[in-house]
Amino acid sequence: MSKQEIRLVRVAPAYAEKIADYRAEFPASRMRVTLNPNAIPGLDRLEEFESVEAWLRHCESMEGKIDWFLSVRATDEKVVGAAVLRRRLEYDDDDPEFCSHIGYSVRPSERRKGYAGEQLRLVLEKAKEAGLPSVRLICRAENTGSVKTILANGGVWLDTIHGEESGMNVNRYDITLCGEGENQPC
């Protein structure tokens, strides 16, 4: 896959139908980090709203704090992934141990095609543009696809923590974007 094959676009009303189509492809039994079976990483809190349009209004209200993106394939304009960039960890979870700056997913029919790695690379560029010196990412310990994606994008494993409420083992990673070891400061 060439790096030009997908591009990030901000979520917007023009993509409402494609967001609904994307969401419909996720089975309730899929692997997730959250307890909520309806949550889809990258589309934070979509399941809490009556419609995609209401969720999009919420996204607008969080401008400057959280950015939502869709990964769109250039050849056919299909949404193959979704990602969220949280400027601060406090915008993620009630439990700070389970917070991450970036959440992402790839629609089930488009997995194993290299989209996750490229999507994460593009979101890391957005994080750097936003001035974040580093980002924290989490994934379930047994999610080997996400582990490989994070490591391939410079992730450094911190630890594995256990969620008492969820019963999940979650790996935590940091990725340095700028500052120490980089030529350009943020």
Image (tube, helix red, strand yellow):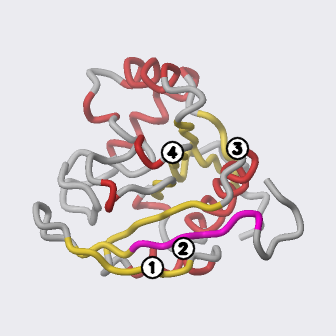
Crowding around mark 3 (Cα neighbors within 10 Å: few <14, some 14 to 19, many 20+) is few
Expressed as whole percent of the image width and height from the top left, the position of residue 59 reads: 48, 26
Mark earlier in primary sequence (2, 1): 2
Residue linked to disc 1: 158
Crowding around mark 2 (Cα neighbors within 10 Å: few <14, some 14 to 19, many 20+) is many
Crowding around mark 1 (Cα neighbors within 10 Å: few <14, some 14 to 19, many 20+) is few
Side of 166 relative to 99 (left or right): left
Inter-mark Cα distance, 1 to 4? 19 Å
Q: Which label lies toward us, 2 or 4?
A: 4
| Location of residue 34 with respect to 63 vertically, above or below | below
Question: Is 25 part of what is drawn in magenta?
Answer: no
The amino acid sitting under disc 2 is Ile
The amino acid sitting under disc 1 is Leu
Expressed as whole percent of the image width and height from the top left, the position of residue 38 reads: 23, 45
Judging depth in this view, the residue of 79 and 58 nearest the camera is: 58
Judging depth in this view, the residue of 78 and 87 nearest the camera is: 87
Residue linked to disc 3: 130
Inter-mark Cα distance, 1 to 3? 23 Å
What residue range appears in magenta?
172-179
Question: Is 177 part of what is drawn in magenta?
Answer: yes
The reply to whether discs 3 and 2 touch (Cβ–Cβ < 8 Å) is: no
The amino acid sitting under disc 3 is Ala
Based on the displayed image, in which of its 4 quarters is residue 154 positioned?
A: bottom right
Residue linked to disc 4: 88
Side of 73 relative to 146 (left or right): right
Inter-mark Cα distance, 2 to 1? 12 Å
Expressed as whole percent of the image width and height from the top left, the position of residue 81 reads: 52, 52
- Numbered label attached to residue 90: none
Inter-mark Cα distance, 2 to 4? 19 Å
The amino acid sitting under disc 4 is Arg
- Numbered label attached to residue 150: 2
